[in-house]
Amino acid sequence: MTRKIGRLKERARAAGVPVIYVNDNFGRWRSDFRAQIDFCLAQNHVVARWCGACQPEDEDYFVVKPKHSGFFATTLKTLLRYLGVHRLIIVGIAGIFCVLFTANDAYMRDYELTIPADCVISNTKGENRQALQLMRDYLKADIRSSVKIKFPRPRKKQARHEGNGI
């Protein structure tokens, strides 16, 4: 999954689409995002492996969240409005929790949703299938494979990004 997310991120960046990391704060209320990445890398579980393979770059945006949804008690809505985003591509760990809750909140805010099935993982395959089916059936999410996602052609210089965010 991490390789697929990495390739999707490269394609998004080449198209000029902003990349936004939305990560748990793990109860670390005094840490900044870089400190969160360092904390995750020091752990001995799947989050450390994911962080190692999908680290943010300087031009990426980030939001630290206290609960499951990327919208709950965060600046995500403000950032998306600033960037002019109307379509979200949501990927990540905990499809049955964090991805589903964020997708639900995005749907309630009228965002178009793409949630590539090959870029989401849950504790079990059954939970992941259930989460993807819920997002497809009730949130109108496009769950096509990441390689089938089309990005706009890059423009030479953009002050604001044209309608997409990952």
Image (cartoon, rainbow, N blue to C red):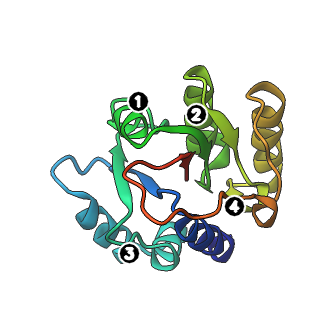
* Dot 2 or dot 3, earlier in sequence: 3
Q: CA distance from mark 4 to mark 3?
A: 20 Å
| Residue pointed to by mark 1 | 72
* Dot 4 or dot 1, earlier in sequence: 1
Locate residue 139 relative to residue 52 in the image: left or right: right
For label 4, count other residues whose C-alpha is less than 10 Å away and answer few (under 14), some (14-19) or many (20+): many
For label 3, count other residues whose C-alpha is less than 10 Å away and answer few (under 14), some (14-19) or many (20+): some
Tags 4 and 3 in contact by the CB under 8 Å rule? no
Residue type marked 3: Leu
Residue 119, numbered label: 4
Q: CA distance from mark 2 to mark 4?
A: 16 Å
Q: Quadrant of the N terminus?
A: bottom right
Residue 154, numbered label: none
Coordinates of residue 9 in the picture (x, y in percent)? 57, 68
Q: Compared to 49, does 83 lie above or below?
A: above
* Dot 2 or dot 4, earlier in sequence: 2
SS at mark 3? helix
Locate residue 46 relative to residue 55 in the image: left or right: right
Residue type marked 1: Phe
Residue 101, numbered label: 2
Q: CA distance from mark 1 to mark 2?
A: 9 Å
SS at mark 4? helix
Residue type marked 2: Phe
| Residue pointed to by mark 3 | 41
Locate residue 65 relative to residue 144 in the image: left or right: left
Res. 46 image quadrant: bottom right
